[in-house]
Amino acid sequence: MKLTKNLNTLSKIEFLSIFGSIFEKSEWIATRTYQLKPFNDQEDLINKMMKIYNNCSEEKILEIFNLHPKLAIEKKLTNFSSNEQSGAELDNCTIDELNEFKKLNLDYKKKFKFPFIIAVKGKNKDEILANFRKRLNNNYDEEFQEAKKQVTKIALLRLHEILSIN
């Protein structure tokens, strides 16, 4: 979805329908962002939204992490996640790839207590699996910071797509 209206003229319902899924199933971030109107420009909106996320407590960040789908095996996806995973061909795995994704998802969640998160846009299955295997060796603090960085990257990619920013 590309935004064609002025940000400051959007109703709350319109705003949430456009920006509510920027952070996976965390519409409250878009709600808080909407309350910060008016926006000087698109970058102001992005900065305000990212500031809300970056100022979250560790517990809230973990809640956001745990709303992300398990790669390649999750069936209930947001439109953004579905398109992103499809673009990386995660919906077209071989049985061996699917089994490896299942095992990696299970091992990762058991170790870190949140799902593996990576911005899949522009990546293929092999790159994602290699990254998955590598990051499973991280310690908790390293992986928490990496997952937080990946959520930021996903959100920015989604915002740039909506706002048509290159």
Image (spheres, rainbow, N blue to C red):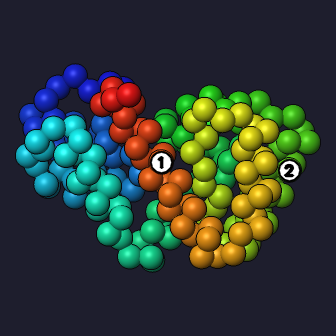
User: Is the residue marked by circle 2 packed among few (<14), some (14-19), or many (20+) residues within 10 Å?
Assistant: some
Name which residue lies at 62% across and 71% down.
142
The nearer-to-camera label among 2 and 1 is 1
Which residue is drawn at the image coordinates 66% and 35% (left, top)? 123
In the picture of the structure, the residue carrying the numbered disc 2 is 100
**How many numbered marks, from 0 up?**
2
At 50% from the left and 58% from the top, the residue drawn is: 149
What x and y, as percent, mark residue 89?
Answer: 71, 30
Please state which amino acid type lies under the numbered disc 1.
Lys
Residue 9, position as x, y percentages in the image: 9, 34
Q: Which residue is mark 1?
A: 153
* 57 with respect to 81 (left or right): left
Would you place residue 40 above or below residue 138 in this image?
above
Q: Residues within 10 Å of mark 1 (few under 14, many from 20)?
A: some
- Compared across the picture, whether 15 is left or right of 66 comes to left
- What kind of element bears circle 2? helix
Whether residue 73 appears in this view of the structure is no
Q: Which mark is residue 119?
A: none
Which residue occupies the foreground of this view, 144 or 91? 144
Residue 17 on image: x %, y %:
30, 38
Q: Is residue 85 above or below residue 76?
A: above
Instruction: Give the residue type that dot 2 points to.
Output: Glu
| Horizontal and vertical percent position of residue 137 | 77, 68
Q: Against 26, is 9 above or below?
A: above
